[in-house]
Amino acid sequence: MTAASLLAADPLLAGKVDLAVVLIVALKAVIVLAFLLVATMLMIWFERKVHADMTNRIGPNQAGPFGILQSVADGVKVFFKEDLLPDRADRFVFRLAPFLSVVPAFLTFAVVPIGGNFSDADGGVIELFGHRTLLQLADPPIGVLLVLAMSSIAVYGVMLAGWSSGSKYPLLGSVRASAQMVSYEAALGLSTVTVVLVAGTLTTSGIVAAQHTWNWNLWATGIVPFVVFLIAATAELNRPPFDLVEAEQELVGGFHTEYSGVRFAMYYLAEFMNTVTMSAIIVTLFLGGPNGPVLVGPEWLWGIVWFFAKLMLLLFTFAWFRATLPRFRYDQLMDLGWKALIPLALGWLLLMIAIRVGSDEGWNPILVMVVGVAALAAGYALLVLAGRTARRNRELAGAHL
Amino acid sequence: MAQYLPVVTLLALAVLFAALSFVASRLLAPRNPTAAKSAPYECGIVPSREPPERFPVRFYLVAMIFIVFDIEIIFLYPYAVISGELGAFGLVEMIVFVVAVFASFVFLIANGALDWGPSRRLRRVDPRVSAERTTATTVRRVGLDGREEAA
Amino acid sequence: MTLLATVNSDVPFNVAQNVGFGVIAVLMVTGALRVVTTNNVVHAALWLVLVLAGAAAQFILLAAEFVAITQVLVYIGAIVVLFLFGVMLTRAPIRGEAGLTRSNWFGGALVGVLLLGLLSFTLLDTFGGDRLPADTRLTLRPAAVSQAEGTEPTAGSNVGAVSDSIFSRYLIPFEAVSVLLTAALIGAIVLARKE
């Protein structure tokens, strides 16, 4: 067990829980809530601006300087819009579904460390009002799994919205979307295991602490899990090029077609908030979180600066994807998830385990690599063979299923 | 578990935020539903058909296969945490565990359980050969008269 | 940690933990009753989610967070999703099923009560007034306490302990799981192959 995992718990809550501790927790929670709302508003504006620039348009430019207040204006407006409840809707579930989408979007951010100095043995602990704590809302021992659990709950928001609308396009959209989210969740979970393997702990603070001095998981895990995670995250967020959920040519607005007014705004908010949160999770898992060199000025500031710099980079990448990549077809989407990403992540994980165990046991590294790659190639060959068999059978039979 | 206290706090705040938004909208937004507004969306026409009641069984299959993978992934995490202590023994354990599931996954793919594509791929036919329907495609190619000379 | 889950302290009764248990238990029982009384299948599945989430919360109160998160990921995130898919893919009238018969409710209730009695008896008979031993790895002590005592601090989590037991004491069941998963996938193939 590494030193990082021994510091697993937030020292703030390890001792006696008194009033000051409760107040610090409440303050942190309010800050996270406010931060997420502001960041989401800015992300919506940022994405529209980037997308506009990339497609040679101007984008929002009326509300505030550079149109930066456009999302605020939209947000205020939406409160004054009529909120329709469709006739054939299941009233209870229709009202419940937005909660199930927006609440997990908030909760995921609780485990993201946004600052702190992880280079010493303290592992990112800072002093706040005389109490030692981490610059993250919560640091539960199963941190990374909480992220996966939240994304599995988010499926309900989408699924129930479509079912409860009592209308055909939302139902089609939600069945598509939930199958997509469920499929890519497996790839998401598998690529995260590699990170846990390298860090030796499930806590996010431990994972960040294991990445200090440029030992980022991006290369410590060999890039492949990062690529798998990025693709799976894009699909999990239903963002382009995986936005089949709301393919407007086929499904109108997808699962939220029947939603209007502030309920629709909740889905919109959840979508972009999930983008911000997922980017923060990628920064934490693969890009070293707040780790980075301290240049000039106060030490505590640089962790936050590096975290936000990396976050911006990822948010730009997501906007870039949207402006550049054409939408997938549904069979391509499912093939990519099940027949490429999942086997790739699983195979890479086994290879990483073999390499690590091999170096612990003093095996010949070249031999381990050769045997590992050969085994992966054999697995790949089997998959290709299986795919061919399926295609041949299908074409012979003329139909499948 | 005090470590989960902040998460519960944020949960309460998030629920409160969403609930207050709905209350605010209820107070501020106009309310005059009409039959046309609250009918199911159908691009402006009167809906004539019920929403679909049956979907391909493949969606169900995906959920079922996902359960298997979910359980497998959950078992990978405890291993990942203590992999350093287990050494070669753990590696063998993991390989046996993963290979058993992978083998059946390959078998599953070979049986076409995860195929979503069209049951027959369109074969590219030379447009100059025939404008009629072929055995490979039911798409009738039209408007070839002008192209014949061009090609 | 001193707030709850002081299983090995001298205080025999932890107020906060027991209040938490009571509140969650009431929610779970309500949810469970609604599962069997509602006439809408999707509502029943949602009430089931409430029950399962309550069970996860109880596990967290017992400091078994890995089990709790597994409960959420597997039961809520996969199995009830499968139920919902099944319901949606067949036929789920939004207004609920009108012509449901409840003529067998007495038999069902009887079986339920008998099962409850059997499970309670087994649990009480096996564990009764057992206490967790004070020096088990499962007990969670804050790092400060263990430093003061000069003992090795626990990892703040029992994930390590769970892993240890999976790969030593419960190794055979663990490998049996892979066989079970294989069987499940073959079941899926049977579904896929519609002759």
Image: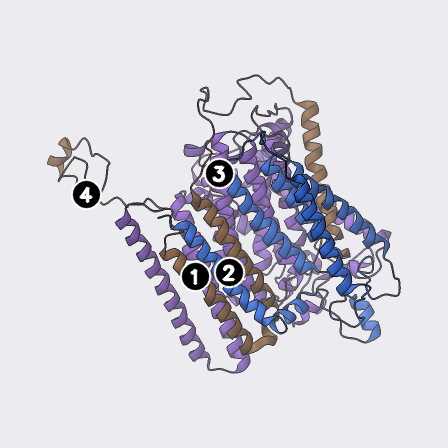
Chain colours: A purple, B brown, C blue
Disc 4 versus disc 3: nearer the observer: 3
Q: Regarding mark 4 in the picture, which secondary structure is present there?
A: loop
Please state which amino acid type lies under the numbered disc 1.
Ser
- As drawn, the label of residue B125 is 4
Q: Residue A228, how many percent across, how many down? A: 48, 57
Chain letter of disc 2 in the image: C
Question: CB under 8 Å between callouts 3 and 1?
Answer: no
Please state which amino acid type lies under the numbered disc 4.
Val
Q: In the rendered image of this protein, does residue C139 appear above or below residue A178? A: below
For label 1, the residue is B104
Q: In the rendered image of this protein, does residue C99 appear above or below residue B101? A: above
Question: CB under 8 Å between callouts 2 and 1?
Answer: yes
For label 2, the residue is C181
Taking the image as shown, residue A149 lies to the left or right of residue B45, namely: right
Q: Earlier in the sequence, mark 4 or mark 1?
A: 1
- As drawn, the label of residue C90 is 3
Q: Regarding mark 2 in the picture, which secondary structure is present there?
A: helix
Q: Residue A356, how many percent across, how many down? A: 53, 74
Please state which amino acid type lies under the numbered disc 3.
Thr
Residue at coordinates 66% horizontally, 43% vertically from top-left?
Answer: C107
Q: Regarding mark 1 in the picture, which secondary structure is present there?
A: helix
Camera-nearest residue between A214 and C153: C153
Taking the image as shown, residue B106 lies to the left or right of residue A206, namely: left
